Image (cartoon, coloured by chain):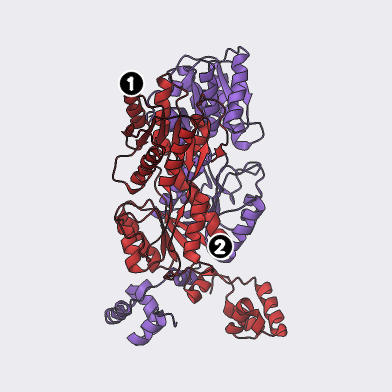
Chain colours: A red, B purple
Amino acid sequence: MGNGLPTIGDVARLAGVSPQTVSNVLNSPHIVSDTTRVKVQAVIDQLGYRPNSAARQLRTRASSTIGIRIDPTTSDGVSGAALDRFLHELTQQAEDRGLRVLLFTATSPEDEIAQYTKLRDTADVDAIVVTSTVFADPRLAWLRNERLPFVAFGRPWGNDLEDHRIRWVDVDGHEGVRRATQHLYGRGLRQIGYLGWPHGSGTGDDRRLGWLDACAELGIDSTAELVAEDRVPDARVAVQALLTGGSGVEAFVCVSDTLALGALMAVREAGRPHFPVIGFDNTPVARAVGLSSVDQSLDAVAQAVVDLLLGDGSRIVQPIPEDEPHHRLVAPRLVVRRSSHLAVIENTPTTGETV
Amino acid sequence: MGNGLPTIGDVARLAGVSPQTVSNVLNSPHIVSDTTRVKVQAVIDQLGYRPNSAARQLRTRASSTIGIRIDPTTSDGVSGAALDRFLHELTQQAEDRGLRVLLFTATSPEDEIAQYTKLRDTADVDAIVVTSTVFADPRLAWLRNERLPFVAFGRPWGNDLEDHRIRWVDVDGHEGVRRATQHLYGRGLRQIGYLGWPHGSGTGDDRRLGWLDACAELGIDSTAELVAEDRVPDARVAVQALLTGGSGVEAFVCVSDTLALGALMAVREAGRPHFPVIGFDNTPVARAVGLSSVDQSLDAVAQAVVDLLLGDGSRIVQPIPEDEPHHRLVAPRLVVRRSSHLAVIENTPTTGETV
């Protein structure tokens, strides 16, 4: 081709066989005679010929690549760590099944859809992994209608969860918060408060229900509820106000590690370092400050995403057969550290005990 | 091709022209007559033919893709956040210049080299970005010898830094720690200690020299030096021991946010919440707890990486011309928060003031 790299044609010419025979030696050696195979292989070695992915991709129309959006660094950065961890796990699990992960960025849902279009039209990816799903997510509707294979990490809130054309994996946040509440109850606490996001987000509302249901099951009070935007200072101010008001609340389950960190600061400033707090996401911050937290089991989430894409095989399945499940709800794990042990949280952070 | 997607041959047949003419319409329309162009374009639209990346890749032997390793989640996780942030910045900067980022994993330097080989042999990437360089890094030697284009984020420690075949970008850690020390001096402190990693790492030794040089320039004592592995509890224990020993040290500059967090815990437990501490990396943990920290300017690092790969053009340059610089040393920024303000660190975290 003029750039010095040998082609399949060069190999064929020098070996005195057809390009198809060279292709057979590489892809179906069992149908080629031993003599021919040895001869062709010698020329391949001599020329240093390498079959390339682009050629295979043209042949199979498959890139074996998954596209996923990566966001700009968030201002707060505590919660973004969970998506970063998911990306690490996804890359590992995908690689174990022969898939690569290609990154892209987008400034809005519309821009993200434009990126999908481009990646599909250039055949750079075979499937998309969608993260941070929102209510009536336009990305899911587009992907479903265009029949581009995809899996959402996050439920298709506001869509029919049973719609077989929308594959999704999510963490059972309801169950995670329920277990956190039960854990505090098991340690003798009866006034367990909840610090959540403003209502209306699928994920936040689901987690909040886990607290309400646990309180109902345990027969304890569920009036101590605080709401804050997902920022450390907002949580700190909200908890400060509650503690100053002389509330009888004895512990907090929080919708995120970000809010839990603000709560920890507030209880410490109020001279109550033993006040139990549990976060959600098990971020590096939780590990660093010894905060108990609900871990999203992102290894299991990543594995489920890859399973839903590949089924039992090695090619991306589209559409997924009607008799096979098109979604997975992953059980989270509660990681118990000092912040829920009624101990001073500044003590040595530990790896944590999983409940 | 039997799978229903139209090929360039289908377009050529239906338009009554050669495949080369279709290719010219797509890639060099100025050499095609208007009549032909309109006719071919109509068939392209009619069939919904899309030139695909695999075909372009075969033609140009370029994938416009950079490969980068992504590590498993680290046990500690505080410092890994900097590499995650770099990945976000790199994806953005690469995309702005028409390049994609492909992820892979590796369990060892040897395994990483095996991955390079595979990615090169399949033409899946045009270049590699190497992170976390170590002394006499075997990955850099391999990439240099194989002439696979690459840029290292991190100096080629133990190699000739002027070797033109090794492109690299690094943060000037010496300068960052020097500024942190000067900043504390400017706030009236004279006994400024250093909490570093065990000697022998290129990055750690470079940062430590920044402290030593600043102390020498300022004419202050540089004997209060502590060493700890990069884990929060190790740092905490080391600083505890020093404070219990009745040292006169008044502040600490730390080689990482991980160690700085351990130091913060120790000084707080010792009843000295106003004791100034400065970290390095400006991780989410630093933002969350109000820790002053040296920011690596990862946006500038990512831009320098892409610049060294592409030069002024849109194709990856190999080799880089002898008269052009093959490396960049990026100046870090000191982000000042409450931990270096002689104030209680639990107060509202702020975005920070950049020095």
Q: Where does the image place residue B208, in percent across and percent down from the top left?
A: 59, 28
Picture quadrant of residue A256: top left
Q: Going from the N terminus, do you reach mark 1 or mark 2 first?
A: 2
Is residue A153 toward the left or the right of residue A350 in the image? Answer: left
- Nearest the camera: A312 or A242? A242
Q: Where does the image place residue A56, in percent across and percent down from the top left?
A: 53, 73
Is residue B195 toward the left or the right of residue B45 in the image? Answer: right
Is residue B313 toward the left or the right of residue A100 in the image? Answer: left
Name the residue that disc number 1 marks: A246
Q: Is residue A86 above or below residue A257?
A: below
Q: Is residue B274 above or below residue B58?
A: above
Picture quadrant of residue B238: top right
Residue at x 61%, y 18% (from the top left corner): B242
Picture quadrant of residue B249: top right
Name the residue that disc number 2 marks: A97
Measure the C-alpha gap from mark 1 to mark 2: 56 Å
Q: Where does the image place residue A136, in percent across and percent down from the top left?
A: 29, 55
Chain name for mark 2: A
Is residue A125 at all visible to an observer of this figure? no
**SS for dot 2:** loop
Q: Amino acid at mark 1?
A: Gly
**SS for dot 1:** loop
Q: Amino acid at mark 2?
A: Arg
Is residue B319 toward the left or the right of residue B38 in the image? Answer: right
Is residue B137 at all visible to an observer of this figure? yes
Chain name for mark 1: A
* Disc 1 crowd, CA 10 A, few/some/many (<14, 14-19, 20+): few
